[in-house]
Image (spheres, rainbow, N blue to C red):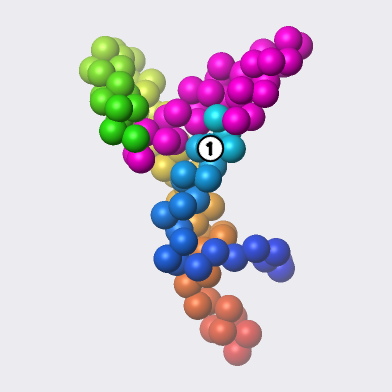
Amino acid sequence: MKQWITIKPEHKKYIRLVAGILILLLGGVFMLVPFIPLGYIFVFAGLFLLATYIPFLKKIIEKIKKKDDKGLVEKAEKKINKVEEEIDEKLVDNGNKQSNAS
């Protein structure tokens, strides 16, 4: 399968930031459109992704985790990390192109 985009390892740290901002903006747009009820979900998902970069959001997530009896926040966090690892495997170029071509 041909990859149409690759990311250099030094730019890997920006994947989560860009995804968080895009999802947050998408949520804002969906909140303005009355027939798409997913706006709040996208806003919360975007804020959750950005919590690693914004200390204020990280504190809020930690408070929510303490109050979460069912562990739903931790499950969501694990799922986001898993998806992020899968994206890293597919998009980040670790020099594997040369070994595949031989």
Camera-nearest residue between 17 and 86: 17
- Considering the image in quadrants, where does the C terminus appear? bottom right
Depicted 13 relative to depicted 10: above or below: above
Any part of residue 14 in sight:
yes
Q: Residue furthest top?
A: 34
From this view, report whether residue 102 is shown above or below residue 4: below
Magenta stretch, main secondary structure, is helix
Q: Is residue 51 left or right of residue 25?
A: left
Q: Which residues are magenta?
A: 25-53
Residue furthest right in the image = 35
Residue 23 to residue 98: above or below: above
Q: Quadrant of residue 53?
A: top left
> Is 33 included in the stretch rendered in magenta?
yes
Work out whether residue 86 can be spotted. Answer: no
Q: Is residue 58 left or right of residue 78?
A: left
Q: Residue at x 61, y 24 (%)?
A: 27
Whole-percent x and y of residue 100? 59, 80
Please state which of residues 76 and 46 is positioned toward the viewer in this rendering.
46
Q: Quadrant of residue 73?
A: top left
Task: In this rendered view, identify the residue nearer to me: 17 or 100.
Answer: 17
State how many labels appear.
1
Residue 75 image position (x, y, % from top left): 39, 28
Q: Nearer the viewer, residue 48 or 32?
A: 32
Tag 1: amino acid: Ile
Q: Which residue does the image show at 30% across and 17% down from the upper left?
A: 64
Q: Residues within 10 Å of mark 1 (few under 14, many from 20)?
A: some
Residue that label 1 marks: 21
Q: In which quadrant is the N terminus drawn? A: bottom right
Task: Decide if residue 44 is on the left or right side of residue 64.
Answer: right
Q: Is residue 89 left or right of residue 75?
A: right
> Does the stretch in magenta take in 3?
no
